[in-house]
Image (cartoon, rainbow, N blue to C red):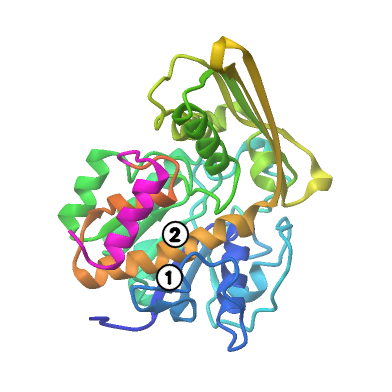
Amino acid sequence: MNKSKKIKVALVGIGNCASSLVQGVSFYSRPESTTVGLMHPNFAGFNVSDIEFVAAFDVDKRKVGKDLAEAIFQKPNCTTKFQEVELLDTKVLRGHVLDGVAPHMREYFIVDEEQESVDIAQELRKSGAEMLISYLPVGSAEASRFYANEAIKAGVGFINAIPEFICSDPAWIAKFKEKGIPCVGDDIKSQFGATILHRIVTRFIEDRGHKIDNTYQLNVGGNTDFLNMKDESRLISKRLSKTNAVTSILGEKDFGVRIGPSDYIPHLNDNKICYINVKGKQFGELPFELDIKLSVEDSPNSAGVMIDVIRAMKVAIDRGVSGNLGAISAYYFKSPEVQYRDDIARTMVEDFINFKQ
């Protein structure tokens, strides 16, 4: 059924998440590689080694013009280097800035304002890319929609890894469907991160007959994602996405909740520390309280999910599926068009793999 075994992927935003993804593809493509960290070593006939990066876009002059294998290790990237990557013969091209660089981030992203941006749709077509992954900074509302539209113009699938509501928006879904191409999103979940843990815990508490009075989730980290979100105006969609991801699957929603990034701590680099607190009432209306701390490498935690999403997108393209991929969005993203409990969404993914309608 596979029209082409290779999965040709384009990236926009060559930051820490892109670095972990590119490293991960190289890591799991080794003949002696482990399968630890993979949810699906084989996804509907596709292995990790089938993924090929054919185009890349960024605006930082330290990355533009370099081979993707070199660009992923340039500053301000700070994620852990766990795999050497051979040259990929894919040069990072100058993308469009728009609102992708916040004013307070100008000293961290070195942009050559005189360098001309490339025609994104044209480069996507030229590279043979089948899909475009958006790893733009949080708060890039205008840029996100620009790149989504370029994907539509080029006729390639679109994966929205950030909390801008595109692939969950019926109007945008209709645009992709009209073009005959798939989209998936929005706001990718970590493989085992704050959102998935918070969802599991609160749902379990409710399933066991307890009542939640209030809950909060605070996150700190030292990568540019956390620095970018120090501007509160850029994380409105992020806070909404993370909050809805937790509360949407609960029957009772009338309780105090505060979820979202809280501070940037430079020396943490790509380490993300999450604190979750839940207070409520148990049998006899006696009080209970739960405190959890989770510490993870942030970007690799996302890459493990994206490796599945890329292969799911390829499967959809080969099957001629267009519009939003409901099962994939529901299981792998925080803000899908329709929210499902994680156990149900996982079954939906397995049905997708096995081509069950």
Q: Nearer the viewer, residue 319 or 138?
A: 319
Is label 1 in a helix, a strand or a loop?
Answer: strand
Residue 163: % across, % down:
47, 40
Give residue 87's position: percent from left, percent from top.
Answer: 61, 83
Earlier in the chain: of badge 1 and badge 2, it is 1
Q: Quadrant of residue 179?
A: bottom left
Which region shows up in magenta?
337-357
Which residue type carries mark 2? Ile
Label 2 element class: strand
Do we see residue 223 in this rendering? Answer: yes
Q: Residue at x 75, y 45 (%)?
A: 222
The type of residue carrying mark 1 is Val
Left or right of 169, for residue 138: right
Crowding at mark 1 (Cα within 10 Å: few <14, some 14-19, many 20+): many
Q: Is residue 41 above or below residue 237?
A: below
Quadrant where the image shows the C terminus: bottom left
In the rendered structure, find residue 76 and report the number of the disc placed on it.
Answer: none
Q: At 39% across and 47% down in the image, what residue appears? A: 343
Q: CA distance from mark 1 to mark 2?
A: 8 Å
In the rendered structure, are the residues bearing label 1 and label 2 in contact, judged by CB atoms less than 8 Å apart? yes
Confirm whether residue 58 shows in the render.
no
Which residue is tagged 1? Answer: 9
Residue that mark 2 sits on: 133
Work out whether 210 lies above or below 59. Answer: above
Q: Position of residue 293 (x, y in %)?
A: 72, 38
Return the residue found at the far right: 267
232 or 195, nearer to the observer: 195
Name which residue lies at 45% across and 42% down.
334
* Numbered-mark total: 2
Q: Residue at x 35, y 65 (%)?
A: 312
